């Protein structure tokens, strides 16, 4: 399981907490407090991974300090915590959709599968990975 360094930024007197992933350009999030930001950081990381062809290898905080172009300015501008966030799979959200299919195709599906929706979902996943 990959773990990425996340920088949880905050300002004294404000409740919102921002999250930045230096290894993943454009991957950021925020929450109303630290716990909310932590949950949303996992979600942001998982969504980023779903949309990416390949993820870079995570760097240590030492490497981020020396290699991340924004480190010098960023570290002077914000109060922050350094936290490792694990890449976790997103929980599937099942919703009902109406689709139209040729009756002959539905009969063929019914001959080989007990659950049409599961069969169609698996076929779509396989097609999208090619």
Image (cartoon, rainbow, N blue to C red):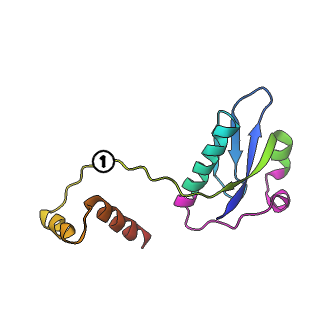
Task: Name which residue lies at 69% across and 40% down.
Answer: 18
Identify which residue, 65 or 85, lies in the foreground: 85
Considering the numbered disc 1 on the image, is that residue within a helix, a strand or a loop? loop
Which of the 4 image quadrants contains residue 127? bottom left
Task: Name which residue lies at 23% across and 72% down.
Answer: 112
Q: Is residue 92 left or right of residue 13?
A: left
Task: Name which residue lies at 76% across and 63% down.
Answer: 59
Quick check: is 15 in the magenta stretch? no
As displayed, is residue 105 above or below residue 44? Answer: below
What residue would you read off at disc 1?
Answer: 96
Which residue appears farthest toward the left when viewing the image?
103
Identify which residue, 76 or 123, lies in the foreground: 123
Locate the C terminus and report the quarter of the image it occupies.
bottom left
Q: Residues within 10 Å of mark 1 (few under 14, many from 20)?
A: few
Quick check: is 52 in the magenta stretch? yes
Expressed as whole percent of the image width and height from the top left, the position of residue 52 reads 56, 62
The range drawn in magenta is: 49-71
Expressed as whole percent of the image width and height from the top left, the position of residue 97 reads 29, 49
What number of labels is visible?
1
As displayed, is residue 30 above or below residue 27? Answer: above
Q: Is residue 109 left or right of residue 35?
A: left
Which of the 4 image quadrants contains residue 23? bottom right
Which residue appears farthest toward the front when viewing the image?
114
Expressed as whole percent of the image width and height from the top left, the position of residue 64 reads 80, 59
Task: Name which residue lies at 20% across and 55% down.
Answer: 100
Expressed as whole percent of the image width and height from the top left, the position of residue 5 reads 74, 55
Locate the N terminus and report the quarter of the image it occupies.
bottom right
As displayed, is residue 102 above or below residue 93? Answer: below
């Amino acid at each position: 399981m990959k773990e990425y360094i996340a920088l949880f930024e905050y300002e004294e007197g404000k409740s919102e907490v921002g999250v930045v992933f230096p290894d993943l350009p454009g991957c950021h999030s925020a929450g109303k407090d630290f716990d909310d930001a932590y949950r949303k950081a996992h979600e942001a990381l998982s969504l980023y991974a779903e949309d990416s062809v390949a993820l870079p290898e995570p760097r240590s905080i030492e490497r981020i300090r020396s290699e991340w172009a924004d480190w010098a300015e960023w570290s002077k501008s914000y109060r922050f915590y350094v936290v490792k966030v694990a890449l976790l799979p997103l929980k599937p959200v099942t919703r009902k959709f109406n689709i139209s299919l040729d009756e002959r195709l539905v009969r063929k599906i019914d001959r080989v599968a007990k659950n049409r929706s599961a069969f169609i979902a698996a076929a779509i996943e396989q097609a999208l990975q090619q």
